[in-house]
Amino acid sequence: MVGNKADAPDRKVNAEEVAAFVTDKNLQYYETSAKTGQNVRDMFITVATRLNERTPTAGIGVRQKGESLEKVA
């Protein structure tokens, strides 16, 4: 789960509510700021890594380095 505008002084949801929610739902949480870049890179790396770990690649035309597109199709 991602909360944006970490740089904003007025929170709409307090930190305790967020902590309770993510704990209850077993979620990973990032507070980010598009304005300052806070945690944005880390969040995207985590999401991409998790998707890569969970996505089966067999039979969907994943191209290995150096392979032509014709070989994959």
Image (spheres, rainbow, N blue to C red):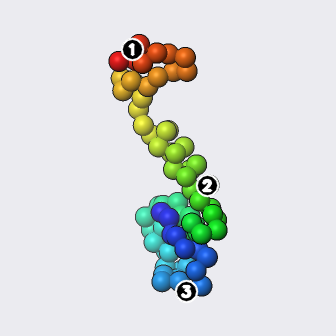
Where is residue 32 shown, x and y percent of the image?
A: 57, 67
Instruction: Decide which of tag 3 and tag 2 comes sooner along the chain.
Output: 3
Q: Residue at x 58, y 49 (%)?
A: 45
Q: Residue at x 62, y 55 (%)?
A: 42
Residue projecting furthest to the top: 71
Could you tell me the amino acid type at mark 2? Arg
Where is residue 33 shown, x and y percent of the image?
A: 58, 68
Give the structural element (helix, strand or loop) at label 2.
helix
Q: Quadrant of residue 71?
A: top left
Q: Is residue 60 above or below residue 16?
A: above
The Cα atoms of the two marked residues, 3 and 2, are separated by 23 Å
Which residue is denoted by mark 2 in the rendering?
A: 41
Could you tell me the amino acid type at mark 1? Glu
Frontmost residue, 31 versus 16? 31
Residue depth check, mark 1 versus mark 3: number of the one nearer the observer: 1
Q: Residue at x 35, y 18 (%)?
A: 73
Frontmost residue, 36 versus 4? 36
Mark 1 vs 2: CB contact within 8 A:
no
Which residue is denoted by mark 1 in the rendering?
A: 70
Tell me how many marks there are.
3
Q: Which mark is residue 10?
A: 3
The Cα atoms of the two marked residues, 1 and 3, are separated by 54 Å
Where is residue 49 shown, x and y percent of the image?
A: 54, 43
Instruction: Decide which of tag 1 and tag 3 comes sooner along the chain.
Output: 3
The Cα atoms of the two marked residues, 1 and 2, are separated by 34 Å
Q: Is residue 13 above or below residue 24?
A: below
